[in-house]
Amino acid sequence: MFRAYVVDDEPNVLENLTGNPLFIDCGYKIAGSSTDPIEAMNEIKRIIPDVVFTDLKMPGLSGVELMEQLRERGAECEFVIISAHGDFEASRRFFKMKGFDYLTKPVSDEELQSLLGRLSGRIAGKKASLSTHGGTSSPELNRIIAFLEKSLEEKHTLESLSEKFDINATYICHLFSVNLGTTFVSYMTKLRMETAADLLKGTRKSVKEIAGICGYDYLYFVQVFKKYHACTPTAFREGRGE
């Protein structure tokens, strides 16, 4: 699930937005919220959400100012401004800093659902790009991924990775969630299934050999491959499943 943080100085607005079930339905978890933009800034730096929803007009720090200060500190999350006020200058500054979009108060379910759908595509694309080109922004996770890619045949678990890298298993889960928007188990399945597909198309190795290279016994490999690619390994190799 993607992680969202919400900032609004009106407690009732904050409660209504964070309690909206559309977030869960659209694949988002509310990772934190605050009515105080200064407190929010410190929490956002610690939590590292995928997106920040922030009110525009707040005492002490506006939503655009919050975004500016977080950007200056290296925050790469998306930003959505929520406002009942029209402010051309604030809008110009917001989009100049590559803010994602505006929501107008009161926020309708239709408007929120549409935005969350578009936002999911943006966040997923960023995570995929990080994964494909040069790794993620986490050196720790990059080391773990490099190790996993070179040792697919091993039976990796969070506990075995925790022991090897001397990193808490819960924190490893956090790294996969924050940087790639997925779980360790889902990432391993994707890595193994895509490696298997490459081997089936690019080599003459038998399906049983490929299963072993990817860390599976033969029968379970066929089962997982069929679920992931919607065809058997043999059909995939012959082009009948594409």
Image (cartoon, grey):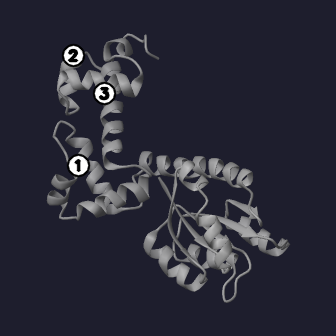
**Residue 76: image location, x then y, percent:** 53, 65
Q: Is residue 160 left or right of residue 95?
A: left
Amino acid at dot 1? Phe
User: Which residue is located at x 67 percent, y 80 percent?
Assistant: 65
**Residue 13: image location, x then y, percent:** 68, 72
Q: CA distance from mark 2 to mark 1?
A: 25 Å
Amino acid at dot 3? Val
Mark 1, other Cα within 10 Å: few <14 / some 14–19 / many ≥20: few
User: Which residue is located at x 44 percent, y 48 percent?
Assistant: 133
Q: Quadrant of residue 209?
A: top left
**Secondary structure state at the residue bearing disc 1:** helix
Which residue lies under the disc numbered 1? 147
**Secondary structure state at the residue bearing disc 2:** loop
Q: CA distance from mark 3 to mark 1?
A: 22 Å
Amino acid at dot 2? Ser
Q: CA distance from mark 2 to mark 3?
A: 17 Å
Q: Residue furthest bottom?
A: 60
**Residue 226: image location, x then y, percent:** 35, 22
- Of mark 3 and mark 1, the one earlier in the sequence is 1
Q: Is residue 3 left or right of residue 117?
A: left
Q: Is residue 146 above or below residue 77?
A: above
Mark 2, other Cα within 10 Å: few <14 / some 14–19 / many ≥20: few
User: Which residue is located at x 35 percent, y 19 percent?
Assistant: 201
Q: Are marks 2 and 1 in contact (CB under 8 Å)?
A: no
Q: Is residue 169 above or below residue 223?
A: below
Q: Is residue 73 left or right of residue 222?
A: right
Which residue lies under the disc numbered 2? 206
Q: Nearer the viewer, mark 3 or mark 1?
A: 3
**Secondary structure state at the residue bearing disc 3:** helix
Which residue lies under the disc numbered 3? 224
